[in-house]
Image (cartoon, helix red, strand yellow):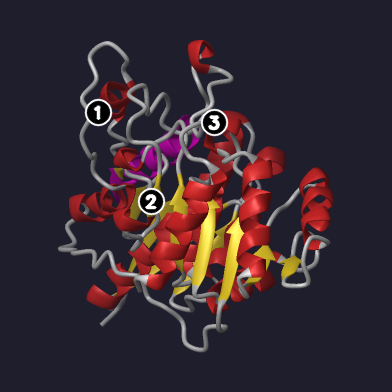
Amino acid sequence: MTKKKILVLRFSALGDVTMIAPVLQELIEQHPHVEIYVASRPFMETIFQQFPSIHFIGVDLNNHYKGFWGLYKLYKELVVYNFDYVADLHNVIRSKVITALFRLNGTKTATLDKGRAEKKALVSQTNRRFQPLKLTTERYADVFRKLGFSFTLSHGLKPRPNKEDKAIGIAPYAAFKSKMYPLEKMKYIAQSLAEKGYTVYLFGGGKDEKEELKKWEALHPNIHSLAGTMSFKEELEKIAQLPWMISMDSANMHLASLMGTKTISIWGGTHPYAGFLGYGQSMDHVIQDETMTIRPTSIFGKDPKEFEGVDYFQQLSQEIVLQKIIDLIAST
């Protein structure tokens, strides 16, 4: 039987693209007659390398496909694959243009419903509808259902073998300050876990993060900063070896999910009700201040002006969070 080809479009951001991978893998498991091609930014290729059944097409939008004619050029390069379906998992102008061009040539297409109205109601301070929204991974799956595929997600974490004994990863950074547990408090937690015999691995990216985490490393022999010491692929392999990860509402939570690592996530201005909890992760492993009635103030972490500078973690002392982490690890 000739396999049906599906083009998947999702150009950013890292966490959102990472959430696609387990969805696509389960789609292939349930429909082995399909062949999936993901078009995304070149950096994202590492995410899909562990799935040999998923093909990757690197697209450098910034340098090669600007404006309508740039997108038309990209379409002309993609159309030669003879795709049977196009799944737009981004729903932004660029992906809409490409999807529309495919639709005009007779290709069956479907586009992500982001649930914007529901999310707006979730963060409203005047007429809030505070309820769990559909998981983003289910929204992704809905796109394939629109294309005609019966599809049930497991929402299960798939742990890797050979986990390192009594080790834990900490990724203390996030794209927005509203999502970051205060660094001094997190430093205390890292040192305390190290003193309790845990091997603590620190994850970070930019120059400032590397310098800061290097200072943490000096606090205890059990603390090791991996920031700037290995490739993205090597970082993923390290995360896969860890029994536990501590992260913010950030890409690191989704990377840990991808690698089958249980994650304790700490939430500030955002809330897991928006649908972005890591795939297969448990709400029981979420740490947040549930008494703070203004939460969530945003969906992705960029606060409205009236909430800039709010401390969403004021009721989450370092001692409280440390004890919650220890209790969660001990209970599994």
Q: Is residue 116 above or below residue 76?
A: above
Q: Amino acid at mark 3?
A: Ser
The x, y position of residue 14, in whole percent, is 55, 50
For the point 32% across and 15% down, the residue is 125
The x, y position of residue 62, in whole percent, is 68, 39
Query: Would you say residue 186 is visible in this rendering?
Result: yes
Q: Which residue is mark 1?
A: 118
Q: Which residue is mark 2?
A: 286
Q: Is residue 193 left or right of residue 3?
A: right
Q: Amino acid at mark 1?
A: Glu
Range drawn in magenta: 91-110
For the residues carrying marks 1 and 2, which lies nearer the camera in this image?
A: 2
Q: Which residue is mark 3?
A: 178
Q: Amino acid at mark 2?
A: Val
Q: Name the N-terminal-most of marks 2 and 3.
A: 3
Q: Answer with the quarter of the image where residue 215 lies.
A: bottom right
Q: Secondary structure at mark 2?
A: strand
The x, y position of residue 149, in whole percent, is 19, 61
Q: Name the N-terminal-most of marks 1 and 2.
A: 1
For the point 24% across and 68% down, the residue is 154
Q: Secondary structure at mark 1?
A: helix
Q: Is residue 8 above or below residue 173?
A: below
Front residue of this view, candidates 251 and 220: 220
Q: Is residue 212 magenta?
A: no
Would you call the spot at circle 1 few (<14 residues within 10 Å), some (14-19), or many (20 or more)? some
Give how far apart the Cα atoms at labels 1 and 3 are: 21 Å
Q: Is residue 101 magenta?
A: yes
Front residue of this view, candidates 151 and 170: 170
Give how far apart the Cα atoms at labels 1 and 2 are: 22 Å
Classified by dominant secondary structure, the portion drawn in magenta counts as helix
Q: Is residue 318 left or right of residue 36?
A: right
